[in-house]
Amino acid sequence: MSRSDVLVDADWVQAHLDDPGIVLVEVDEDTSAYDKGHIRGAVRIDWKTELQDPVRRDFVDKTGFEALLSDKGIANDDLVILYGGNNNWFAAYAYWYFRLYGHQNVKLLDGGRKKWELDSRDLVTDVPSRPKTSYTATEQDASIRALRDEVVDAISNKNLVDVRSPDEFSGKLLAPAHLPQEQAQRGGHIPTARNIPWSKAANDDGTFRSDEELRKLYEEAGVDLSKATIAYCRIGERSSHTWFALHELLGLPDVKNYDGSWTEYGSLVGVPIELGEAK
Amino acid sequence: MTDGCGAPAQTASLPATVDLANEAVIQGTVEREGTVVPGAYARLLDSTGEFTGEVVTSDEGIFRFFAAPGDWTVRVLAPGGVSIDSNVTAQTGEIANVKVAI
């Protein structure tokens, strides 16, 4: 798999805005950004209300995903280009999720909304209407999703990549610094995890670093790229970004995203927690 | 429902749910020739230069971080290749104000 199979740049998107069979999708948690302006033709997916189960802590099931994509007017053979704010965290999460439910023809816009804005490219407020489709998803691909027991078993056995900031890793902060810090869970990280913040995989403008830079980054931080890897963060979107870098850009075969991440692990009774820097 | 890690609205006053006594807040405004700049990117870097968080300035040009006590750098990005660093010290129970002119 090469980079162009999974990633497109802003120039490419600009040149293909009117191509049939291509659907641009903006994915955000705070969807007011879309209302203020989005790339022409882009439909919106609300990470919080459309991708998460409204009751259980899980994301929508296969039927829910099929209904969502059908409503958005996305067909099985469409090329879906995902982008969003927060350096593409939620778009990367959606990418992982599209893959999880078997949509193969999906790519990320490199740099997402930020790069597009910093380039001063056009944003519009017109909301496109797309005819409803009848989308069919596959069963979840368990090979890219880690659940908690597998994560506990991975301690000392697999690479655990904690992509939160160093202060969240050490236990000093419980959430990213733009969020209030009061949370139920304990601070710290999963023992044997390496701390490679998601942001190290990206440039200031939100684009991904080169394959050579990425490989060097993870190897120098002590990740054995020949072994299986589980990435986690606080709730699984920043780690989707790193999952994308490891699995899609570097092409490592066995990389899973632990979407329960620290809000689950740090609340589990009886599991080991390590504080401070990586041991 | 689980809240995401995305930044909340960058309002002019602290959200009512936040108890300042427990937070080390860094906030400020981005201005260009005396006019506030919405839609700029404010990145918070720790004392080693490591990225910690990023928000987009509000319509009033405001950004806000909930940091930890210590020394931080706020880096503001805007169209036209603008990238400006400002150093700031945060303390629990206080709001450290930063004004960034681009």
Image: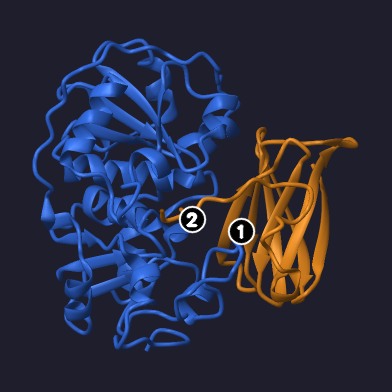
Chain colours: A blue, B orange
Label 2 neighbour load within 10 Å: few <14, some 14-19, many 20+? many
Marks 2 and 1 share the same chain: no
Q: In which quarter of the image is residue A120?
A: top right
- Quadrant including the C terminus of chain A: bottom left
Asked if residue B89 can be seen in this view, the reply is: yes
Q: Is mark 1 on a helix, strand or loop?
A: loop
Q: Pinpoint residue A239: horizontal percent, then vertical percent.
A: 35, 58
> Badge 1 is on which residue?
A178
The foreground one among A7 and A85 is A85
User: Which amino acid type is marked by label 2?
Assistant: Cys
Q: Which residue is drawn at 21% across and 60% down?
A: A256
User: In this picture, is A72 found above or below A143?
Assistant: above
Identify the amino acid type marked 1. Answer: His
Q: Can the viewer see residue A207 in this picture?
A: no
* Residue closest to the far front: A55
Q: Is mark 2 on a helix, strand or loop?
A: loop
| Rendering coords of residue B92 (x, y %) | 74, 77
Disc 2: host chain? B
Chain ID at mark 1? A
Compared across the picture, whether A49 is left or right of A227 comes to: right
Where's the N terminus of chain A, which quadrant? top left
Crowding around mark 1 (Cα neighbors within 10 Å: few <14, some 14 to 19, many 20+) is many
Q: Mark 2 points at which residue?
A: B5
Where is A204 relative to A39, above or below? below
Please state if A121 lies on the left or on the right of A244 as rendered.
right
